[in-house]
Amino acid sequence: MDSNNFFHDLHADTSLESSRKKRRKIEAESHSSETEIKWKSESAQRIYAVKLVEALQRTSSQNAPPAPSEAAGGRVVRDVADRVLAMAAKGRTRWSRAILASRLRLTMLRRHRKVKKASGSASRPRKPLPTAAEDRKNRLPAVGNRVKILSRLVPGCKGIPVTNLLEEAGDYIAALQMQVRAMTALTEIISVSQGDRLGSSSSSQA
């Protein structure tokens, strides 16, 4: 093969691979911006609020007797709100799939605990605490430690590349911000409704 043809083909392959990488990068950036805009839209917030109210009403009717405590009720609302948020993402992200899968695992774990409690299994031995040398060895650099902490905060993102982790974190934060706005608006509506109800009842008694 002629050397000129060889270098020409090599340059063409390199240019093609470079253009593919640029195209993938542009597509990833556009997808990230689209999801961020989606979570900031009023329609997404409205749809989420409606779905959340419906899910809370179903949960309330299922758990009516007996009434849960305030702490347990807060956990139920948080779990329902996160599950509805994950469903709004339609499983397109790791964090949404992890939240939906964790509910399934939690249900299976509860069943397993009931069976285990009935069988009366023995307690597990505790793991020994790490020595000072092992603790120093397991310490991570500052940046690596922060990345590890971030991967723990975003559901389903342990051990993934940093680039993917940052994309998931950005989408997760935008989704949580929308969740806060929707729940704040619902709280204000409920407060106004309760105030009007109390005002009408006091005026009728007078």
Image (cartoon, rainbow, N blue to C red):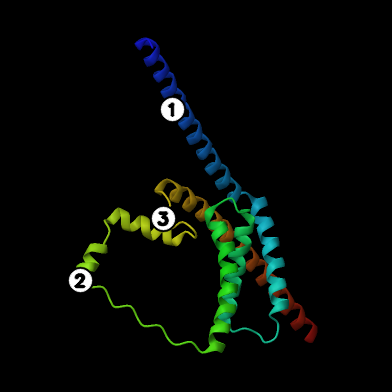
| Element type where label 2 sits in the image | helix
The location of residue 152, given as percent across then percent down, is: 42, 61
Q: Give the mark nearer the N terminus: 2 vs 1.
A: 1
The location of residue 71, given as percent across then percent down, is: 55, 80
Residue under the image location 37 percent in, 15 percent down: 7
Residue under the image location 55 percent in, 66 percent down: 102
With respect to residue 11, does 187 lie above or below?
A: below
Q: How packed is label 2: few (under 14 Cα within 10 Å), some, or many (20 or more)?
A: few
Q: Which residue is mark 1?
A: 18
| Element type where label 3 sits in the image | loop
Tell me how far mark 2 sits from mark 3, CA to CA: 25 Å
Q: How many marks?
A: 3
Instruction: Kindly indicate whether the residue at mark 3 contacts the one at mark 1 (C-beta within 8 angstroms).
Output: no
Q: Quarter-wise, where is residue 204 in the image?
A: bottom right
Q: Which residue is mark 3?
A: 159
Mark 3: which amino acid?
A: Gly
Residue under the image location 54 percent in, 38 percent down: 30
Q: Nearer the viewer, residue 32 or 190?
A: 32
Q: Give the mark nearer the N terminus: 2 vs 3.
A: 2
Residue under the image location 48 percent in, 35 percent down: 25
The location of residue 197, given as percent across then percent down, is: 74, 77
Q: Which residue is mark 2?
A: 132
Mark 1: which amino acid?
A: Ser
Tell me how far mark 1 sits from mark 3, CA to CA: 27 Å
| Element type where label 1 sits in the image | helix
Mark 2: which amino acid?
A: Ala
Q: Nearer the viewer, residue 153 or 122?
A: 122
Q: Give the mark nearer the N terminus: 1 vs 3.
A: 1
The location of residue 74, given as percent across then percent down, is: 57, 76
Instruction: Kindly indicate whether the residue at mark 3 contacts the one at mark 2 (C-beta within 8 angstroms).
Output: no
